[in-house]
Amino acid sequence: MNVLSIVETGFRATLEEQDDAALWCCAALQKAGMTIDLLLRGNATVYVIKGQDPSGVRIGAATIEKPRILDEDLLAMKKAGATIRVVREDLEERGITVEDVTGEFELVSRGQIADIVRQYDQVWHW
C-alpha cells in the first residue's frame, strides 16, 4: 500500500517534543516500512524554507527546549525514500521564492494535485 499524506495545517502541536504531529506520524510509519510520500500545501509549505532557526521560540511562558528543524526532518524522510512535493502557488501566496526553499523538494502546481492523488492507494489529509 502506498500513501500520500497531504499536510496543509502548519505547526500543529509544535510545542510537543516530537514536532509537527503529521510529520512525526509519517516519519514513524516510514521507519516501520510503510511507503509514504508528502504533499505540503497551505501554511505547511513554510516547512521547506532553508536555514530556519526555531531556537528561542516562546509561546507565552512556555519555551521549546529542543525545537525541531522541519526542513531537516523532511530531508531525512526524502533520504529514506519519500517523495516530498510542495505546492508552488501556496509558497508564492506567502511571499516565499524558489531561492528560499531547500532545493531537494519537488514543486508542483495546484492543477497537478488530482493527478498526483490518483497514484496512491490511500490519501490522508492533515
Image (cartoon, grey):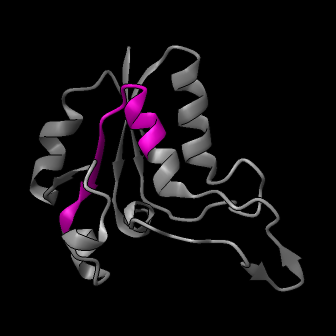
Rendering quarter of residue 62:
bottom right
- Please, is residue 92 above or below residue 83 in the view? below
Residue 110 is situated, as x and y percent measured from the top left of the image, at 16, 59
Magenta-highlighted residues = 75-88
Visible residue check, residue 39: yes
Task: Please tell me which residue is depicted at 70% across the width and 62% down the height of the picture.
Answer: 67
Task: Please tell me which residue is depicted at 69% across the width and 60% down the height of the picture.
Answer: 13
Visible residue check, residue 125: no
Residue 49 is situated, as x and y percent measured from the top left of the image, at 39, 67
Extreme residue toward the right, this view: 61
- Please, is residue 41 above or below residue 37 in the view? below
Image quadrant holding the N terminus, namely top left
Task: Please tell me which residue is depicted at 27% across the width and 25% down the height of the picture.
Answer: 120
- Residue 79 magenta-drawn? yes
Residue 67 appears left or right of 101 = right
- Please, is residue 124 above or below residue 87 in the view? above
